[in-house]
Image: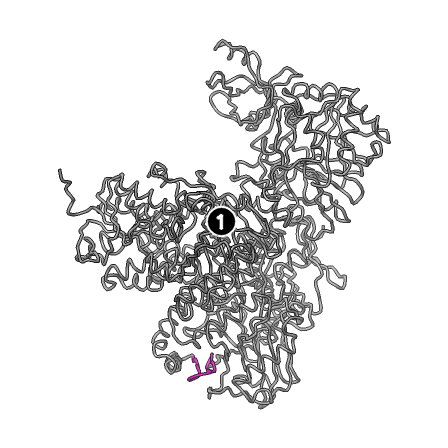
Amino acid sequence: MTVQIPRTWDAIVIGGGHNGLVCAAYLARAGRKVLVLERRPLVGGAAVTEEVFPGFRFTVFSYVVSLLRPEIIRDLDLPAHGLNVVPLESTFNPLPDGDYLATWADPEETRRELYRHSPRDADAYVEFGRLMQRMAMAVKPILGISPPDPGSWRPKDLLAMGRLGKHFRDLGEKELHALVKLMTMSSADYLSEWFESEALKAAKSASGIIGTFLGPRSPGTAYVLLHHYMGEIDGVFRAWGFARGGTGAVSESIASAARSFGAEVRTDAAVERVLVEGDRAVGVVLGDGKELRAKTVVSGLDPRRTFLELVEPASLPEELVSAVERFRFRGSSGKVNLALSELPNFTALPGMGPHLKGAIAIAPSVDYLERAYDDAKRGEFSRRPFLDMVIPSMLDPTMAPPGKHVMSIFVQYAPYHRNGGWDDASREAFGDAVVDTLAEYAPNIRSAILHRQVITPADIEAVTGLSEGNIFGGELALSQLFFLRPSPAWSDHRTPLRGYYQCGSGTHPGGGIMGASGRLAANAVIADGTA
Amino acid sequence: MTSLGTRTTPFHSRTAPLVRGHAWRRWAGYVVPAAYDLIHDLEYAAIRGTAALIDVTPLFKYRIRGAGAAALLDRVVTRDVRRAKTGQVLYTPWCDPDGKVLDDGTVTRLGEDDFRLTSAHPNLRWLHQNAVGIDADIDDESEAVAALSLQGPAAREILGSVADRDVSKLRFFRATQARLEGIPVTLTRTGYTGDLGYEIWVGNDRAEALWDLLVAAGNPHGLLPTGLLAMDVARIEAGLLLIDVDYISARLALIETQKSSPFELNLGWTVAKEKRPFVGQRALEAERNGGSSWAFRGLVVDWDSLEALYAEVGLPPQLPSAAWRTSTPIFDGGRQVGYATSGCWSPLLKKYLALAHLGSVHAAPGTEVEIEVTIEHRRKRALATVTETPFFDPERKRA
Amino acid sequence: MSVPRLDAIVIGSGLEELVAAARLAGAGRRVVVLEPRDSVGGAAAGEQILPGFRMDPVYADAGFLDPRALGDLELDRHGVSLLTPDPFLAAPADRGDSLVLWRDLARSRASIARRSAGDADHWPGFAARMETFARVLEELAGRPPVRPGGPLLDLAPFLGLGRRIRGLGRERMTELFRVLPLPAHDLLEDEFRDPLLKGVLAAMSVRGVFQGPRSPGTALAFLHHHVGSPGGVFGIRTVVRGGVARLADALATAARARGVEIRLGASVERIACTNGRAAGVALASGEEIVSRVVVSGADPRRTLLDLAGTEALDPDFVHAVRQIRFRGGFARIHLALSEAPRFEGISEAVPGVIAIASDLEHVERAYDDAKHGRASELPVLEARIPSLADASLAPEGRHVMSVDVRFVPVGDRGQGDYAPDALADRVVELLAERAPTLPGTILERKVLMPADMEERYGWTNGDPYQGELALDQLLFMRPVPGWAGYRTPIPGLYLCGTGTHPAGAITGASGRHAANAVLEDLGGAR
């Protein structure tokens, strides 16, 4: 018996990144015939696990699972499809003076550790955590809705605006003020209101700059601090975790869930453009010229590709085109993946220990991070960069051959617009800067390196297709958030072309392995009844 | 110092070998004995009958000295610190600017410009935030000073036998410096049991010697090392509040309704009238005049009613010997009017007691309410009567 | 208790204080202004570099003279005459034609076109858009700050504002939301190609902030400095003939005419409280003055923590006040010149700003140095030669010049990279690269470091804005969240300085709003 392949699809999702897959899974779950088209031989986009060196598997681009929405895990039953997130419970920041700053799973243990650095900060840390929890509660509803268009007089938008207004007023004045501060301040200033220990301020503010082209003293970086607390209010798992099998396993589990609902996921299938008839998207044209027709097309690519490359910009309102043209990408980070013969041995805390199972960061002072940013502003990679590391093989031994390890190093800053551009020589020089930096804290690292993979923003763009190598599909800056992501009036995952939708990190609510935009896009498609 | 592990008190070398059931409890980052024996009944009996020796080192201790020390504390706490005489101890809560309780503890005036504040939660940052513009030094003595609580009818005699001064002169909520067989200590006539008792504050280096001395001196009087489980029963009988259990610090509350004012915790008496400005004063004065919507009271569960509920399923009443701390609904007719936050069977009073937050209209002593009890997996309601606390208030406590 | 003879004591005689005092007196209240220095005007008081060479020590212009605040003071009658410098901005170029911007849009466009034809095409649109946005800020400045979390009734006056913002049309409105938190760098990059044009505009966007143009929020600072300016005229507001000091004098005259008593040499040591209420002040001389309310033009930190004291304040509030960021960051150099300097490539006399900011990078790097705690190695300079348009400022044929130097962190206090003299030498050297004859014409110079401004005027860290113009320190967050309405937790104590909404460079608004709050509490006019 032959299976009848449908000639038209209800929905085609362009790009098998995690958001595209989530969108496809929700659409398939709602009974739609869905096809996912992924250019690469494997799904996941920036969330892939690859065996880069024999026996050594890497989460090549992304490195931790931070914000994957628990409702998505529940709705799609991802654990049944192999998702297993191991918490990253500790943080460990070695310092230049030979000391270190750590936080542990147990609050009392953390308190004692912080007390060593500053007794007052030990007190403040608890209160700060409470405030962040309350702020996360305040912000959470926003992540789950499609932004209204503030310029619209449609009842739907006015109602949504009214509801938002009420939500914020219901927070009470104090909480509202706290939220405004969090949204507008620099992480360094914000943290200075709480803490006095330089090491703690630096460790915390580092999380505010990830993926941005800003420094810890730049306004607008404080709210990213919230991300670390979002997980805690969901009660499902802690904010930071490592997926067994790497972030690729997250993508695989979503793809598997999508398939289980009947979606087809096709790899090695590059989409050339979206097929438009009149003001309607009616399908896609593949790289080989083949046309696939569908009632709905969802782009999981970033806004630049969604609006300027997949479709003819001339067919779009000028307002949208100019907004997307001005949308800033400016990839600022790179990645170094190391295959190690032995664990790094940190001078500050020698030998094997629980600190190697958590997040390890080189971010010794706010000034250090600012200097790293200074280099980037001037078009160079940081001579002494901020490093955010995990050793996945500590949590999942299958990532490396027995006794060996893999280390995943997120590096900032590595500007996409490097003076003179990126080439093999600059890539290796960048890798050297990373290893040199790490070696200052773990001198055995040089001799432990068996293989090294260095990824620049140019590489990220070339491989994943993310414009300018921005890991968030566009900067997470105040002027590019909520109804401005990617453009006013088109932040609800719809586009001016009927039947054409958008999801991905470049759309609300933004970056990280979160999946929320995929779900919101699927909701929009279903609500419109276009597929 | 990779993983810091659990922290032990300076008495650990003495207490650890005595903890037969490996029953430890975590308290402010330390582990201390929950019970020494397998069953804590005798330890409770020691509190009420002979003498109990309890390691209370995990309390936070702050030394506040300097010309502005009294001003600083006066600004923070609700009671009038300036009126305290040297050698006086005040029990007091302190509040946030909205008049909601942050913590409670004691203030001991060791000298004109020398105070010790004890608290359940850390308060170093709060003290510093309040010290802006005030000339006072704040030292965190939490890790430098160990503390033992000697509680029970024989406490005075035991202490008297080793002290270099007449401790019988030391009145309720008074403090003195003393030497116990040469060991310098601060003695306060305080405790968390509602019985005759003392708390003894000693430098870490002399802690073990102090323990040995008190155990030896107490032996003839029936002194028992006592854990937190027994103390928990005693403090409920005494109607004493426990933070994180009976109330949530305003500092940690996630929503407004989790916070309580002193009036709502039956601590209205600690809110000084006609005092210089202190944190929360405006809100508290308004509440004093306008009334509170909540009250904190004792409940005595009607035994016949409870027995009858058990009898329905063919069981005799079964109650745990340790205090419970699961929030439990209180009803009047069909309507929930409050919740009990801790409770226990009082072996001494032979009563089933609870401490409860009640809507003010249901808080008058003598009011009959119902408390939820789970009997054989089913929720029932037993009758209970609202009462003033303490449930047990022996003469000897103050005498 | 006897009823105080005085209704209000106003601490300080700066522009805002005088506006507040005049308004209170105009409503029939008995007011005394206490000025610690021996001349009226506070920081606006004029001085001389040399006899006959007049300078405004800190102010470069009079800001936006908000007619809503000053309208009924009849300042012209009291001798204020306004000048409109033209060209308002010029920038000598290292390469190519210099940039000279005029009040006449067409002339500006022509000058820009000599450097970049594309930029010249964009200029009118940019100017128009910025003007639209600045009008919204102007409207905001005209009212006390909105309290978005406050009682619904308080929001009512802002419905009009909401309508106005929506009235911009969707495109302009959303563009406003996009621009407000934007880095000036991005705003300018989107629009222009010419590095020099971007550089000089960026120099404006960092006035009042301790940030570089790449920092989000600097576009808002840029707009703030555009409030009240005609379209396309950036970075310069009203200039008063004879200097800002004349404005202070006129305000003082107007205030006195309404019965305000101004006492000079009266330095307030503390604000006295009775039963938790501000009830007067104690002077350094020991004298005590009783009044029903006290209105302070000193910055919020100094007013509340130093003058009023923390006893009656909640620790949360004290903490919030201590967290206000006062960053200052600029020094001012005054030169008395034997002749007008000639900048190479600029044939016109420029009575406006002559900016030395060759590109965005220049401004950014200047900040980077300051961020790391040093004075900028290559500072951004904004020079003015007001005597070109106002001969009364210097003896005939002679000139005065003032130069704003950014960034000079207060931390330096003359002990860091630059002592005042070294800084002045460096600045003259930099100017001489563009105006070679300048060094030989300097008759005298005076340097005001941030520490000097702190010492002279009581501004924390020498910040004349009394709090950085940062996103989180504006509108209902200024000076601290929850207390943006000129009142303080101490009943009877009010703030009227630039540390309150709408912040510096919008003259008279804070003083007027503060006076209104006082009158509301005292039961209105009498």
**Percent from the top left, x then y, of residue B261?**
60, 36
Q: Nearer the viewer, residue C161 or A104?
A: A104
Q: Is residue B361 left or right of residue B136?
A: left
Q: Is residue B332 left or right of residue B226?
A: left
Image quarter of residue B172: top right
Q: Is residue B220 magenta?
A: no
**Percent from the top left, x then y, of residue B362?**
56, 25
Q: Nearer the viewer, residue C390 or A7?
A: A7
Residue B273 in sight = yes
Q: Nearer the viewer, residue B293 or C319?
A: C319
**Which segment is the magenta one?**
C87-102
Q: Is residue C94 magenta?
A: yes
Q: Tag 1: Cα neighbours inside 10 Å, few (<14), some, or many (≥20)? A: many
| Quarter of the C terminus of chain C within the rendering | bottom right
Relative to C352, does residue B222 appear above or below in the rendering?
above
Query: Which residue position holds label 1?
Result: A176
Q: Nearer the viewer, residue C509 or A154?
A: A154
**Subunit ID for the residue under disc 1:** A
Q: Main secondary structure of the magenta part?
A: loop
